[in-house]
Amino acid sequence: MKTVIIIPYRNRETHLNYWLENTYPLIKKAVPNVEVIVVEQTEGKKFNRGATINIGYLHYNNDENSYITQDVDVNPINDEIINLYGEDVKNDKFLGIYSDGRTLGGIVKFTGSTFKRVNGFPNDYWGWGHEDKDLSNRAEFYNCLIERKIKFEDSDKSKYLNIFQDNHVREDCGKWGLAYGIWDRVPDDQKKSYIESNGLSSLQYKVINEVVLMENVKKITVEI
Ligand code: UDP
Ligand code: MN
């Protein structure tokens, strides 16, 4: 049984190198049996964070493992947060290690079978945002327990995290309306068929390349 850290990735080399050199060693010390998979999306389409994380899960497709989503620009720096990476998370629970109060973005830990139960992230959120709210909607639909530790909005978060700021253009994915606006009014049977038809079970992708970056760290390049 492993803990697999999934990093959605494209074109942020400085951040990735920083994370691998400075943050990964701290995590490795605190978390037994940890592995990292960087899922790099090829150029050509808008970035798709949800689908890249889904691919990281499918690469192992092992429900005994635990998985952690890890944005490449977010670096935990103290023991309290690093130890959360090693926390045992039971089935049907999402542990928001660093997350927005309403979503499951940022750093989130769950077991493989829980991720499979909610059919992972949606695959069609191209561009920035809201796939994290969609995941949270899925978790709530299946009555999973959601626990959030450090929140995006916490004023003391710099105690726990070193977060890179950058001036990338963030092009909204255009799905705010579904994830936040109308979801609560959608009847349960429609929610269920939406979730079941859009996620791990329906994802199409091609692995273009696979390289080992360091011990227990690999990068796969994928076309979605
Ligand atoms: N990301 C990436 N390349 C991109 C866009 C996003 O590697 O062009 C990954 C990266 O892991 C990043 C995460 O997706 O940390 C979330 O994107 P971003 O940092 O732009 O979102 P924000 O922090 O503004 O929510
Ligand atoms: Mn970011």
Image: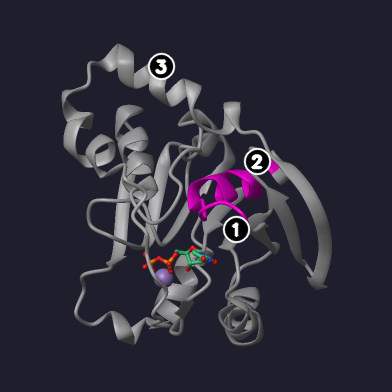
> Marks 2 and 3: which is nearer the front?
3
Mark 2–mark 3 distance (CA, rounded to whole Å): 26 Å
Q: Could you say where residue 46 lies in the image, as x and y percent from the top left?
A: 51, 54
Q: Nearer the viewer, residue 73 or 214?
A: 73
**Res 1 seen here:** no
Mark 3–mark 1 distance (CA, rounded to whole Å): 27 Å
**Res 164 seen here:** yes
Residues in magenta, as a range: 44-58
Q: Image height check: is 195 above or below 213?
A: above
Left/right of residue 46 with respect to residue 129 in the rendered view: right
Mark 2–mark 1 distance (CA, rounded to whole Å): 16 Å
> Marks 3 and 1: which is nearer the front?
3
Q: Could you say where residue 128 lies in the image, as x and y percent from the top left?
A: 39, 56
The residue carrying mark 3 is 193
Residue pictured at 65% horizontal, 41% vertical: 64
> Marks 2 and 1: which is nearer the front?
1
- First in residue order: circle 2 vs circle 3: 2
Q: Image height check: is 165 above or below 204?
A: below
Q: Badge 2: few (under 14), some or many (20 or more) residues near its Cα, within 10 Å?
A: few
Q: Nearer the viewer, residue 211 or 145?
A: 211
The residue carrying mark 2 is 64
Identify the disc placed on residue 6.
1
